[in-house]
Amino acid sequence: MKKENIKPVDPGNNPSPHYSVSELDRKARFVVLFLIMSGVFWLLLGTLLALLASVKMHLPEFLGNAGWLTFGRVRPLHLNTVVYGWSSLTGAGVALWILSRLLKIPIQLRGYILVAGVIWNISLFVGSIQILAGFSRGIEWLEFPVSTMVAMVLCVIIISASVMQMIIMRNVKQLYVSVWYILAAFLWFPLLGLVSSLPVFDTPTVQAGMNWWYAHNALGLWFTPICLAAAYYFIPKVLGRPIYSYGLSLLGFWGLALFYNWNGFHHLIGSPLPTWFVTISISASVMMVIPVVVVAVNHHMTVVGSFKAVKYSPTLRFVVFAAMSYTFVSLQGSMQSLRSVNEVIHFTHFVAAHAHIGMYAFVSMMLFGACYYIIPRITLREWHSKSLIKWHFWLTAIGIIIYVGALQFIGLFQGWSMNNPDVPFTDTVTMTIPYLVARSASGILMGAGHLIFAWLLIKMVFRTSEQPAGAQVLDNIRKEFTV
Amino acid sequence: MIRLSILLFGIIATFVIAMFGLTIVPKFFIDEGVREPTYLTSFEITEGHRIFVREGCIYCHSKQVRPEGFGADFERGWGRASLPTDYRNLLPHNLGTMRTGPDLANIGARQPSRDWHYLNLYQPRAINEKSIMPPFPWLFEVYSERARPGRDGLSLPEQYRIPGMKVLPADEARYLATYLISLVQESTGTE
């Protein structure tokens, strides 16, 4: 706690610690834009890989002779690009901006974050090539080789340092609930990444345990807190009213911290791991109902009475859709962890769809909503087209609903048939094919939405009209980096 | 400032406790039983496992059998329930989470023929025309009919044959087939 005594390093130009909102946003501009835009690049690449993998499921001969594009390499790369590229980079950008606004302090260590961001992107490139070239680590969610993963985690640690510094140097007394979640995320993810890279998990079943402890926590302790922080920030902000209950926020946060940590082994029901470990995870998964319902009630009671605003604010539309998906996916997850349900849906497309409600309908939609709010404020420009934003929302929303509807419906039947030994195994494959085609179609819808989003973003950032003259741009950037 | 320290403590404590519970404690329970190098894993099997990982087989084929009475794994002839000792200390673990294709823990007992595996890897639809498994032609070599006398090419159905040529398994296909055939889970296990 000695650090408190260190005076904020802000010599000369700004002795007073009171920053105006526009000043905060101006200083955040370059870093946040860089993180979000590189995230969107990985989103587009990840979408392409997703489409490729999806099409290969029903047209197995499609690009069948290209070893580096075989399903078993494209599918893990899709996961890694959208998880560590799109969601993590954009999530970090969004989290930093929210922190800067809430703590009334400019984003700290901006130069370092920029360097970290560049290294992070390079790691993603290297890792992508490694997976396509066949050097995958072969562990789901951890396909990047350990060295690449560690490089990426070190980049996150630099951002974590910035988060800590912002909290210590903050210009407000209280820590709003979003700050708790963001602080937790930036402590949890580096720990997760480093522990999962330790060479101590050197027997197969123990490694399987580590695998699902990590994979479930990557969602629960990294993306979920960042996105809940965004929901807690944007819902009251857009509506202009305070969050419904402080007590519920507290309960929701500590409930998540206590129970989510223990959920991982519900991916291993029926596996050779000792049953009692699995049982611990099942109970923790059911306990997750508490923080989830609490957060849902808190958000719902904040929005209730102003639902009309969802119609006018694109941010709120995305954020509310995402928050509702969070409730849905979490309650579904608690159900899925029950042995009787898991017996049917484990090993089927149902789970793939479940994962996409989490990572897409919740995380990605939340990040889209956040971007629609943040980017006009840091670039001081308006979005190019309102109707295109609507298109983006409806294409992605309908896309993910088709995806989930089709695969969860057939996933149930796939599971029931698989558990009926009288049905030949081949039938459990052929019955899914029309639904796999529907998934490819839904992927095209979502992909179109992403292209619209990228187009809007590029149009906004690289717009030549109303752009300040070159010298002034340089001057602005220099100002952002003067500490 | 007390608030922040409680927050920090809680965040780290909840994480560390669960981390021990789910990763370190299982290690103490399981490692003991599987440490003994009772298996002689040959070079071919190790290489086969590497190729299995490289081609991402695990994204469609699980390699874990659920206990009798939980699902229909046993009734389908996929073997007895898997034990931690079944995994031969080959890393990564390959338990898998998906059964777009059938479980492979007992594939060696169901399909002990090398030729069956070669055919299935080169062109899955030569064996089951409804299969959606990707082909792996890069594990094979195509030679002229006259080359390598004495070695017969894969017996492919008419539509997959290349006129005047024969398809022979390359080293990688042989390693992978050896690995797959080594996956047998019929006995009561080594406990």
Image: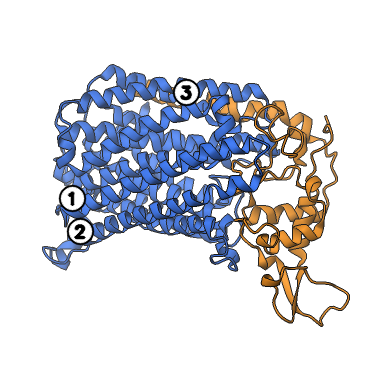
Give the chain of mark 3: A
Report the amino acid beneath label 3. Phe
Q: CA distance from mark 1 to mark 2?
A: 8 Å
Image coordinates of residue A444 in percent, x first then y, are 38, 57
Q: Which badge, 2 or 3, is on the more N-terminal residue?
A: 3
Q: In which image quadrant can residue A238 be found? A: top left
Image coordinates of residue B178 in percent, x first then y, are 80, 55
Image colour for chain A is blue
Q: Residue furthest front?
A: A422
Looking at the image, residue A76 sits to the left or right of residue A274; the answer is left
- The residue wearing badge 2 is A460
Q: In which image quadrant can residue A340 be found? A: top right
SS category of the residue bearing label 2: helix
SS category of the residue bearing label 3: helix
Whether A122 is drawn above or below B96: the answer is below
Q: Is residue A174 visible?
A: no
Q: Residue furthest right?
A: B150
Q: Is residue A160 visible?
A: yes
Give the chain of mark 1: A
Q: What chain is colored orange?
A: B
- The residue wearing badge 3 is A259
